Image: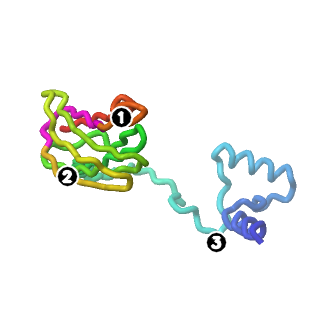
Amino acid sequence: MLLMAALVAGFALGAGPAVGAKHSKSRLVVRKARAHGHLPALPAGRPPLVGTLSVPSTTPTTTTDPAPTTPAPTCPTALGVTEDEYHTNLSRSALCPGSVLIQLRNDGEDDHDLKIVDLDHGTVVATWAIAHPGDAVQKHVTLPSGTYRLFCTLSDGNGVHDDLGMHAVITVG
């Protein structure tokens, strides 16, 4: 059934034997001509392909394209922080300065927390209390332009979570 549909579609699009080609040598010549961009004239009653001109134009045409409009840049003002055993993953690596919604989600099996430190000034910007497995806690924080380090301050039998890889850096501005 599919083969039949493909054959019908192929013939409809001109993939069948060349019109007037009675011998295989004639069909070969037509196929080579098509391969090199030289298409034989269409038989009467057959419409040209979409986008082709039936008569070549000798007058140049000019179009005036409207000036391209660039969309206003979107500036993210929310950040998702997902923590699990010994990873801190951020939903993005850059934010806009100002009020930012930050959500801490604990996808791990152990308790985790979050601390944000402004690396340019060495000050603590925000802290989250312990988030138990499955918890999601969010805060609004105001962040001026700069670079910030986010990390878990807890430790367990394997060591300090920050030392085990639970940290990330984000750029604001």
Between 82 and 113, the one nearer to me in the picture: 113
Give coordinates of residue 76: x percent, y percent: 24, 49
Tell me the crowding category of disc 1: few under 14, some 14 to 19, or many 20 or more residues within 10 angstroms, Cα based.
Answer: many
In the image, taking residue 168 as reference, residue 30 lies left or right, namely right
Upstream in the sequence, badge 2 or badge 1? 2
Considering only vertical position in the picture, is 87 above or below 61? above
Check residue 96 for magenta coloring: no
Between 11 and 47, the one nearer to me in the picture: 11
The residue located at (78%, 47%) in the rendering is 29
Rounded to the nearest angstrom, the CA distance separating label 3 from label 2 is: 71 Å
Dot in front, 1 or 3: 1
Look at the image and tell me in which quarter the N terminus lies. bottom right
The kind of residue on which mark 2 rests is Lys
Please indicate, yes or no, whether residue 131 appears anywhere in the rendered image. yes
Q: Which is more foreground, mark 2 or mark 1?
A: 1
- Disc 1 or 3, which lies upstream in sequence? 3
- Name the mark nearer the viewer: 3 or 2: 2
Q: To which residue does mark 1 refer?
A: 161
Amino acid at circle 1 = His
Q: Position of residue 157 (x, y in %)?
A: 41, 34
Q: Secondary structure at mark 1?
A: loop
- Which residues, given as a range, are shown in magenta? 143-153
Judging by the rendered image, the residue that carries numbered circle 2 is: 139
Residue 150 covered by magenta stretch = yes
The crowding category of the residue bearing disc 2, from other C-alpha atoms within 10 Å (few below 14, some 14 to 19, many at least 20), is few
